[in-house]
Image (cartoon, grey):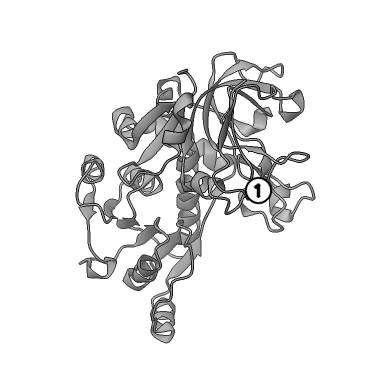
Amino acid sequence: MRALTVRPGTPDSLRLVDDHPEPPTDEGSVLVEALSVGICGTDHEIISGQYGEPTPGSTTLVIGHESLGRVIEDPTGTFEPGDLVAGIVRYPDPVPCPNCAVGEWDMCRNGLYTEHGIKGLPGFARDRWRVPPKFAVRLDPNLAQVGVLLEPTSVVAKAWAHIERIGQRAAWKPQTALVTGAGPIGLLAALLASQRGLTVHVLDRATGGPKPQLVGALGATYHTGNVTDLDFEPDVTLECTGAPVVVLGVMQKAAPTGIVCLTGVSSGGRMIDLDAGALNRELVLENNVVFGSINANRQHWDMASEALAAADAQWLAALITRRLPVSAYAEAYTPSGEDIKVVVDFTQP
């Protein structure tokens, strides 16, 4: 069986293994044939040795947390052979913490969770994988070419769920949403904003390529330049870049009672002059909320599945700018500034 493995902590250790063991049954009753895995910044950071944890008793980790596959068998009867599914990435910790105990493992408080392809659980970049039924999410059969986008969509589905919960603190009727960053997370965040009937704006550095057209196809407005130069104050902002200047800018630009959700992870190491007192004054006097969001639980994965089923399939397909066979894994995992989403196709040799 083919699998893409890394040695966490060892830079550039990504390898294609042709004789990887079959997934043991203790990984879960649902046996799945891999169709594709998506690649994101987390994968690049693991490959560069920045983090990642091997599976217990091993020095290696099968990479890949954005999955899509077809069920081969499920003795529990929850799924039928041929069902299109994706595997949930994070599992609750064994203690468990109060949040994991109630199925909110995305909000784990003690950090003992595990994650497929990232932290202690083998990933989905292998010909076959297993998961328990409650960690498999069924997708609409029409999503066979784009269902690999479910994991990043679950991240923004969670972000929107928390935005809407926070909004209930007052009479809240948001009209305008700003998304900073037009990568996969940003574009999917804009999709979910448009599905909610909001006036959507997307800010990104790119002046050419597919991003402006993808934003326009949603009925949204595409911007370049500085966030502080925008001529409106958004009711909701989803910050998807992690760029410190942009993070600070969206905090300053929020409308009164505005909500800012930070989904981008900053790399750190960059100093920026900031009048913290003025920013604090503005946030307090305007009743703004700024919060961070990452990962997702089962509820959010189901929301994401519904959102993808309701979306235009051609628009979703345009997010996948490169699709390469497993044999071209080195090329697939080499970053390119022109890509939106790169996918490794396990149906090809």
Front-most of residues 191 and 102? 191
Q: Where is residue 63 in the image (x, y as percent from the top left)?
A: 58, 37
Q: Position of residue 268 (x, y in %)?
A: 49, 67
Q: Position of residue 3 (x, y in %)?
A: 59, 28
Front-most of residues 328 and 71? 328
Front-most of residues 59 and 99? 59
Q: Where is residue 69 in the image (x, y as percent from the top left)?
A: 53, 23
Total tally of numbered discs in the picture: 1
Front-most of residues 258 and 308? 308
Let me know if residue 169 appears in the view: no
Graded by Cα atoms within 10 Å as few (under 14), some (14 to 19) or many (20 or more), the crowding at tag 1 reads: many
Apparent side of residue 22 relative to residue 223 in the rendered image (left or right)? right
Element assignment for label 1: helix
Q: Kindly identify the amino acid type of the residue bearing the numbered disc 1.
A: Trp
Q: Which residue is at 48% across, 62% downward? A: 267
Q: Which residue is at 45% across, 24% downward? A: 140
Q: Quadrant of the N terminus?
A: top right
Apparent side of residue 318 relative to residue 129 in the rendered image (left or right)? left
Apparent side of residue 264 relative to residue 210 in the rendered image (left or right)? right
Query: Which residue is denoted by mark 1 in the rendering?
Result: 105
User: Within the image, what quadrant is residue 75 found in?
Assistant: top right
Above/below status of 250 relative to 102: below
Above/below status of 332 relative to 237: above
Q: Which residue is at 22% across, 46% downward? A: 212
Above/below status of 294 relative to 334: below
Above/below status of 205 relative to 124: below
Let me know if residue 268 appears in the view: yes
Apparent side of residue 264 relative to residue 28 in the rendered image (left or right)? left
